[in-house]
Amino acid sequence: MLYISQAEALVNGTTATLVEKSNYSCEHSYYRMNPDAYPPGYPVLLSPLVALFGVNLYALKWLNAVCYMLTMFLVFLFVRKRLSAIEAVLISILRAAFEVR
């Protein structure tokens, strides 16, 4: 949720307030679970969607889906340089279907 809060803060121009509140919350928690703020890359990607749609989780999930599809295309291109087109397609499908952790 902090990523989305940071995206909202970027849109509203209240990042300093968000970091201040997050810092207070972390300092007064029994167990510190997250940093005061995450690196800005992902919140910067989310911020145009937050500006257009507000905090709409479906819209934000679309960004993840697009990034995942782009990743699968890059996997295909990487494998295609080394194997045949059919093998590259099969490996890309298998990679997309079976998430590696």
Image (cartoon, grey):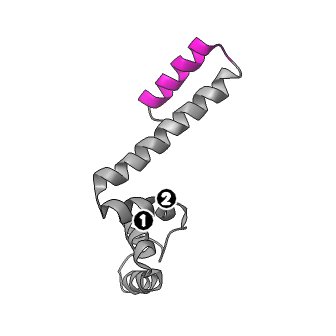
Residue that badge 1 annotates: 3
Identify the element where label 2 is drawn. Answer: helix
Asked whether residue 88 is drawn in magenta, I would say: yes
Where, quadrant-wise, is the N terminus in this rendering?
Answer: bottom left
Question: Compared to 43, does 17 lie above or below?
Answer: below
Q: Position of residue 75 (x, y in %)?
A: 59, 31
Q: Where is residue 83 in the image (x, y as percent from the top left)?
A: 67, 16
* Residue 55: image tag: none
Q: How many labels does the image show?
A: 2
Residue placed at 48% from the left, 36% from the top?
A: 69
The answer to whether residue 10 is left or right of residue 91 is left
Q: Give the range drawn in magenta.
A: 83-97
Majority secondary structure of the magenta segment? Answer: helix
Q: Position of residue 72 (x, y in %)?
A: 52, 33
Residue placed at 35% from the left, 81% from the top?
A: 29
Residue placed at 71% from the left, 20% from the top?
A: 82
Identify the element where label 1 is drawn. Answer: helix
- Residue nearest the observer in this picture, 49 or 64: 49
Question: Compared to 92, does 30 lie above or below?
Answer: below
Nearer to us: label 2 or label 1: 2
- Residue nearest the observer in this picture, 25 or 83: 83
